[in-house]
Image (spheres, rainbow, N blue to C red):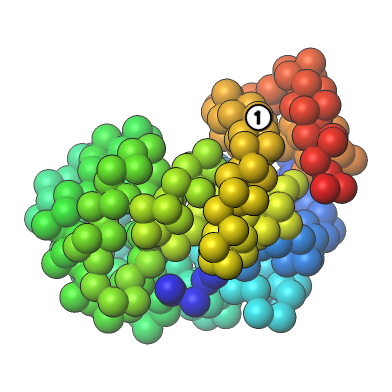
Amino acid sequence: MSGFGPVITAMATPFDECNQLNMDSLRKLVIHLGRHGSSAILVTGTTGEAPVLSATEKLRVWETAVDFSEPGVSIIAGVGTNNTRTTLHSIKVAEEAGVQGLLIVTPYYNCPSQEGLLEHFRQAAQSTDLPILLYNIPSRTGVNLEYDTLSRLMEEKNIVGIKDAGGDVKRISKLKEIAQPGFSIYTGDDKMFLDTLKAGGDGVVSVASHVVGQQMARIYQNFQEGKLKEAEELDKALAPVYNLLGNTMNPAPIKGLLRQMGIAVGGLRLPLVPMEAEEAALLYHTLSHLLDS
C-alpha cells in the first residue's frame, strides 16, 4: 500500500458567508477527519472545489491542512490541471507547503492522447520526490488512462497508486492484475469500497467518510480480519448514504449534509449551486441513525 491507508477523505473546502475561505472551519474539519476514521486527507480535489480556488487560496489550504493534521494522517494535495507547466508549478508550491503526497488528475477538456498522458505524468513524477496518486475519472475529463499507459507509468518510482473513478469493479480487478508490487488501487466511488477490497484493491478516496469515516474504517478492519459478513452488513447499512451523496453533483450533497449537522462549511462557488434544503434534510435523516453506531 502507498502509505496513505485505506480511507482517504476528499475534503470539502469550507467557505464563509461571503464565499471566502473559512480558515477556522477548515482547521476544525481537518482535525475532525483525522480523529474520525480518515487515514489520509485529500485537499483541493474535486470535492474541495479546486477549479474555483485561486493559487493563493490553494496554498493557504495546503499549509493549514499540514499544520493541523493529526499525527499519522497524511495530507495529499490535488495539483492536477490540463496544463503540464501549471501542474509542475503547483507541485513545487505544494511540496514547499509540506504536503505528504500529490493527486494528479488526467488533463481535462483538451483530451490528450495516451502518449500525451504518459509524458504529462512522467514530467510530473520526475519533478518531485513526493508520492503521486494518479486520478482517472473519464466522466469528468473525457479521457481514460488505458492499461498499457498505466503499466508504463508504474515504472516511475514515486507513482505509487491510482484513484480510479470509472465505476467498474472489473477495471479494479484488471488494475490489480497489472499492478507492480507496492502500487495501490483506490476506488473513487464510496459505493464500490468493499467491492474494491474484494477485487484486491486497497481502499477508497471517499466523500462519505466526512460523516461515516469510523464506520468505513471498521469495514476495512473487518475485511482484513476475515470478518466478511460483518463488513458486508456495515457496507449495506451505509449504502443509502453513499447513494444519496451521489445523487447531485459533488460536493453539493456533502456540504448540504455538513451544514445540517451544524458544521460551518458554507455554500458552493458558481457554477455549482447548493442542493435543496429538503434534499439535505432527507440526507441527514437517513444518516442520523448511523452517527453513533
Tell me if mark 1 has few (under 14), some (14-19) or many (20+) residues whose alpha carbon lies within 10 angstroms of its own: some
Q: Residue at x 58, y 45 (%)?
A: 232
Asked if residue 71 shows in the view, the reply is yes
In the rendering, at what x and y percent does residue 190 appear?
A: 54, 43
Q: Is residue 31 left or right of residue 236?
A: right
Q: How many marks?
A: 1
Identify the image quadrant of the N terminus: bottom left
Q: Residue at x 64, y 42 (%)?
A: 233
Q: Is residue 100 left or right of residue 275?
A: left
Q: Nearer the viewer, residue 245 or 241?
A: 241
Q: Residue at x 65, y 29 (%)?
A: 240
Q: Residue at x 54, y 63 (%)?
A: 226
Q: Nearer the viewer, residue 161 or 21?
A: 161
The vertical placement of 154 against 52, above or below, is below
In the rendering, at what x and y percent does residue 256 appear?
A: 75, 31
In the rendering, at what x and y percent does residue 228 appear?
A: 55, 53
Instruction: Using the rendered view, name the quadrant where residue 290 is placed.
Output: top right
Q: Nearer the viewer, residue 152 or 99?
A: 152
Q: Which residue is outermost to the bottom?
A: 129
Instruction: Using the rendered view, name the quadrant where residue 147 is placed.
Output: bottom left
| Secondary element type, mark 1 | helix
In the rendering, at what x and y percent does residue 77 appear?
A: 52, 64
The vertical placement of 3 against 52, above or below, is below
The three-letter code of the residue at mark 1 reads Pro
Read off the residue under disc 1. 240
Q: Is residue 28 left or right of residue 80?
A: right
Instruction: Using the rendered view, name the quadrant where residue 148 is placed.
Output: bottom left
The vertical placement of 251 against 182, above or below, is above
Asked if residue 264 shows in the view, the reply is no
The vertical placement of 23 against 49, above or below, is below
Q: Is residue 180 left or right of residue 268?
A: left
